[in-house]
Every structure is written in structure tokens, then in C-alpha cells.
Image: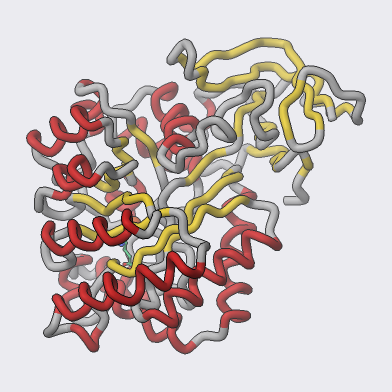
Amino acid sequence: MILKNIGQLTSYNPDSGEVETTSNTSLTIDGDRIAENSNGEAIDCGGSLVTPGFVDPHTHSVFLDSREEEFALRLSGVSYEEIAAQGGGINASINGVRNASKEELIKRVSKRMDRFLKQGTTTVECKTGYGLDTKSELKSLQVIHEVNESHEIDIIPTFLGAHAFPPEFADEHEGYVDLLCAEMIPAVAEQGIAVFCDVFCENGYFNVDQSRRIFKTAKNHGLTPRLHADEFEDSGAAELAAEVGAVSADHLMAVSTAGLEKMAEYGVTATLLPGTTFFLGKDTYAPARKLLEKGIDVALATDFNPGSCQIQSMPFIISLACIHLGMTVEEAFASATYYSAKTLNLEGEVGSIAIGRKADLIIWDVEMLMNIPYNVTDMSIKMVIKNGKAIDL
Ligand code: NIG
Ligand code: FE
């Protein structure tokens, strides 16, 4: 396939460290890769913008039902933390996943993947974390695996058994950590689907000592650490991310200066989730400028989940990053493509346009990069190309 009549071809170039734009150009695709030559059909881009597909490196897509009632409660002034303390939050989604058949979950997750792809996301990380027992966590990973096989989108699976303490361990937190380390992580490794292990390291959830133990076990079983760090309060999670060699520390709304310094020293990427701050109606956005000034790589993600963020659109996340995180359009774009791929160890495959990379592309209905944040919720996507094939949106 040849994309002709591209008005602007825009991609982050890791060699120059810049977002680069080539005007009035064409792009050649051979099979599923960007190539030098091809003799396939030509697609006329009509002078529009072409970019890489988005990489969304933080989502909680494996759940059964949405939780509108919590949104209503928040509108009446109850906070996310209060709702969680009253039995809502993550625990409200456990029975759904535990009681659902694998087939039902596959149906739900596939639909969510359709919506990601429609909005230009061509690679998405999906966490488990609503089963919270061995059987239901393995089932969730199996769901991710089967949807990944049948759906055009590429899914990267993360085991998040340490998302919350399930009700049967409400008064016995160490017992759940024992179960995670002695039974769940070995079973997940044996199953062979999960690539990463995530922990919700936060006051009221998993403390630093518990998180450290879980990551040690995960690493011994070949799983790479990434974590939910300092979302509502600083608990030293960013420092732990550096200590355990996590590929990414996510959220960081309440990160300390000491935490930032450790992340910079150890090269931990910060994955920022401004959609969650926005959706929860908070104004405590993560200190993106401080992170960037320290030389920390910043990635962006949706955090799509039934409780704290229903957003699936990376273009909207870019708008939020520009408006609320103080990022430039180029920074936000690089964070939603190249750096988000980097936190999944996939920057050689996706997230930028170069010969040999996957042909995962967006043909936009706009002419330049600035229109992505500027148009906010306008779906300005003409065509999504995944693995070299035009997707029926
Ligand atoms: O990233 N912080 C932890 N987990 C999710 C919330 C999940 C839920 O409420 O269901 C988050 O915000
Ligand atoms: Fe999350």
C-alpha cells in the first residue's frame, strides 16, 4: 500500500529527540511494515496529517459492568477515596469478574478494543485486577490473550493481582500478599501470558514493603515491574519504582521531590494519567514540567477503568496534557506515541514512523498536529491503519 498526497507526516524521531514533520510526501507500506518500496494500492490522503497510531500503556479494560452510580455519588460531593472506603471502588467490580464466564468477558473487552482502535489507539496495555483470586486473575489474562488473538489491536498483558485487598482478606493483608507471592505469581508465570506485574502502591492499598515483596517475586518469575505510584498521597512509591527497576511509575499526582530525583537517577519513565484527575474532578494534576525538567521520560495513558476514568481517547488525553499538565503539543504527542511505546519496551516496533517499524498509522481529517489538542473532542480521524491494513471503523 502507498499513502499518497500526505500534507504533513508527523512523528517523533528518537535519533534527533524531536517531533519532525515532512510536508507533501508519501509513505510506503509492505505487508505490516513501513518500507522503502511497495507496489500495492495507493490511498489518497487528500493533503491531511498522518501520524503513528497511539500507544496507550495503562488501562484496566478487563471488567464486567460500568459503575455509573459512583460517578453520580461523586457529583454529589463524595470523593473516590470515600466511595472506595464504603465498599465501592475496585472491590465493587470483583464479583462481576469472578462470576462472569470467559466468553462474556471476551465480548465486553472486544467492544472496548473496538472503541480504542476507532480513536486511533493501535497498541494498548491491559491490566487484570478485578478478579483478585488465582482463578479469576488467570481467567482475566486468558481473556486478554484471546481478545488479542481475535482483534486487530495489539494488547500487552499486565498482571495486577495487587490492585486491592479482596473482601476475604480485608483484615488479613499479609495473607493476601502471601497468596500473591506463593500461588498467584507462580501460576501467572506458568500460564505464560502476562509480560508485566503492576502493584497499586498507595496508602490504604499496598504499602512499600508489601509492594517490594511482590515485585521481588514477580521479577524472579520473569515479570517486569511497573506500578501505580503516589496517586492520592506520597507513600514513597516513586522511590520504590527506582529501587526495583520498574520500567514505569504511573499517576504521580502526589510524588515527592525525593521520589522524582530517584526516578531521574534510575531512568524510570513517568506515565501520567491526566484523564483520571479530570474525571475525578480534582485539580491535583501531576507535576509534568518538574518531571521533564529533571530529564525524566514522560509517557501519557488513559487509565481507562470503570471507576476513576472512563476516557478511551488518547487525542483527548493530549488535550488535557497541554491544558492541565503544561506540556507542549510536541511533548504530549511524543509522550502518547514514542514514550508510551517505550514504557512497554516496544519503541523499536511501534510509536514512531521509520522504515521497518510496524505500519500502525492514523490518517487524520485535519492538516496539522496542533489540531489534535485544539479540536478537543472532535473525532477528526479519517482512517486507522493497523499492521498495514485499513481498519473498518
Ligand atoms: O488507576 N488506582 C487504581 N486503579 C484504578 C482505579 C480502578 C477502579 O476504581 O476500578 C486507577 O485509577
Ligand atoms: Fe490505573
Near-viewer residue (171 or 233): 171
* Residue 130 figure quarter: bottom left
> Which quarter of the figure is the N terminus placed in?
top right
Near-viewer residue (297 or 302): 297
Q: Residue at x 43, y 85 (%)?
A: 98
* Residue 186 figure quarter: bottom left
- The image shows a total of numbered marks equal to 0
Q: In the visual, does 150 lie left or right of 186?
A: right
Q: In the visual, does 24 lie left or right of 227?
A: right
Q: Residue at x 49, y 43 (%)?
A: 314
Residue 101: x, y in percent? 56, 85
* Residue 142 figure quarter: bottom right
Q: Residue at x 44, y 80 (%)?
A: 136
Question: Is any part of residue 253 visible from this angle?
Answer: no
Residue 91: x, y in percent? 29, 78
Which quadrant of the render holds ligand 2? bottom left
Residue 13: x, y in percent? 51, 18
Instruction: Answer above or below: position of 119 versus 52.
Output: below
Q: Which color mode does the image show?
A: secondary structure
Residue 23: x, y in percent? 66, 10
Question: Is any part of residue 134 visible from this angle?
Answer: yes
Q: In the visual, does 132 lie left or right of 292?
A: right
Q: Residue at x 63, y 67 (%)?
A: 146
